[in-house]
């Protein structure tokens, strides 16, 4: 047994790793979610649907090429813990790993074809300082690594905002207006590029819409959207 395998086995005895969804112990080749839970992940398959429900969110608001999320998010579902662990419980690499799984499963549809740059939705510096990381950056890294492209932190949050969790659609839209701007000197690097904006979960689309708006002044830019999870939209 290689040293790193021995160390992993020893660590699993002393501090067993458990599945983010069901809480059962993980096998050596199961990084974050067990095979059984991955098999039953409520996949959206939106990448296979023309003008899907997620794309309809942005129709008439911002011009996008395509949009899809990997699995459905319901707050009372055990699968919601994937988002909660990656976002709030200091497990950002879970988001990176499952983004790689999403790419492997979705790439056959052509959803990621032509993507040249992956742009994470940013956190305001105050919120990132409190949390310690931006979960969307890790998700972006998972997609970029699998696709063989680079991550570009092209957008910054110019102000903080209150949580979106208990807000309705109009309140969410108002909460995100003017929240993002493109970073200085990024326009020339983005000109004519097809970028994929990445976030953890989409509900009303207000955050992704505001982030996309920050990039629309770039000549020739094309924008697609990806999230790990999607609230049921219809």
Image (tube, rainbow, N blue to C red):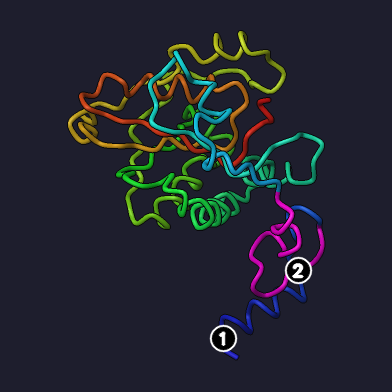
Q: Is residue 78 left or right of residue 98?
A: right
Q: Quadrant of residue 227?
A: top right
Badge 1 is on which residue? Answer: 3
List x then y, in percent, for residue 163: 64, 21
Q: Residue at x 68, y 13 (%)?
A: 168
What range of the chain is rendered magenta?
Answer: 23-41
Element type at marker 2?
A: loop
Q: Quadrant of residue 140?
A: top left
Badge 2 is on which residue? Answer: 15
Sequence-wise, the earlier of marks 1 and 2 is 1
Magenta stretch: includes residue 35 = yes
Q: Vertically, is 203 above or below 48? A: above
List x then y, in percent, for residue 71: 64, 43
List x then y, in percent, for residue 120: 44, 37
Q: Residue at x 71, y 59 (%)?
A: 39
Q: Vertically, is 168 above or below 107? A: above
Q: Is residue 12 left or right of residue 113?
A: right
Q: Residue at x 31, y 21 (%)?
A: 216
Crowding near pointer 1: few (<14 within 10 Å), some, many (20+)? Answer: few
Which is more toward the observer, 42 or 22?
42
Q: Vertically, is 151 above or below 210? A: below
Which is more toward the observer, 16 or 66?
66
The label number, if any, that marks residue 217 in the structure image: none
Element type at marker 1?
A: helix
Q: Main secondary structure of the magenta part?
A: loop
Q: In this view, which residue lies farthest toward the bottom?
A: 1
1 and 2 marks in contact (CB < 8 Å): no
Crowding near pointer 2: few (<14 within 10 Å), some, many (20+)? Answer: few
Q: In this view, which residue lies farthest toward the front?
A: 50
Q: Quadrant of residue 127?
A: top right
Q: Vertically, is 130 above or below 29? A: above
Q: Quadrant of the N terminus?
A: bottom right
């Amino acid at each position: 047994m290689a040293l790193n395998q021995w160390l992993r086995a020893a660590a699993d005895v002393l501090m067993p790793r458990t599945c983010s969804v069901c809480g059962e112990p993980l096998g050596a080749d199961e990084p974050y979610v067990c095979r059984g839970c991955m098999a039953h992940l409520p996949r959206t398959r939106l990448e296979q649907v023309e003008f899907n429900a997620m794309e309809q969110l942005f129709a008439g608001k911002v011009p996008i090429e395509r949009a899809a999320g990997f699995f459905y998010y319901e707050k009372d579902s055990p699968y919601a813990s994937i988002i909660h662990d990656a976002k709030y419980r200091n497990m950002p690499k879970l988001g990176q790993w499952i983004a790689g799984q999403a790419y492997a499963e979705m790439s056959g549809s052509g959803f990621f074809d032509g993507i040249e740059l992956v742009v994470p939705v940013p956190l305001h510096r105050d919120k990132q300082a409190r949390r310690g990381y931006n979960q969307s950056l890790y998700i972006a890294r998972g997609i970029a690594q699998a696709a063989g492209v680079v991550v570009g932190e092209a957008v910054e949050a110019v102000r903080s905002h209150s949580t979106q969790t208990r807000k309705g659609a109009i309140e969410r839209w108002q909460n995100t207006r003017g929240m993002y701007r493109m970073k200085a000197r990024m326009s020339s690097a983005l000109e004519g590029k097809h970028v994929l904006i990445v976030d953890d979960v989409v509900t009303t689309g207000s955050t992704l819409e505001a982030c996309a708006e920050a990039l629309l002044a770039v000549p020739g830019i094309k924008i697609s959207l990806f999230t790990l999870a999607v609230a049921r939209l219809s």
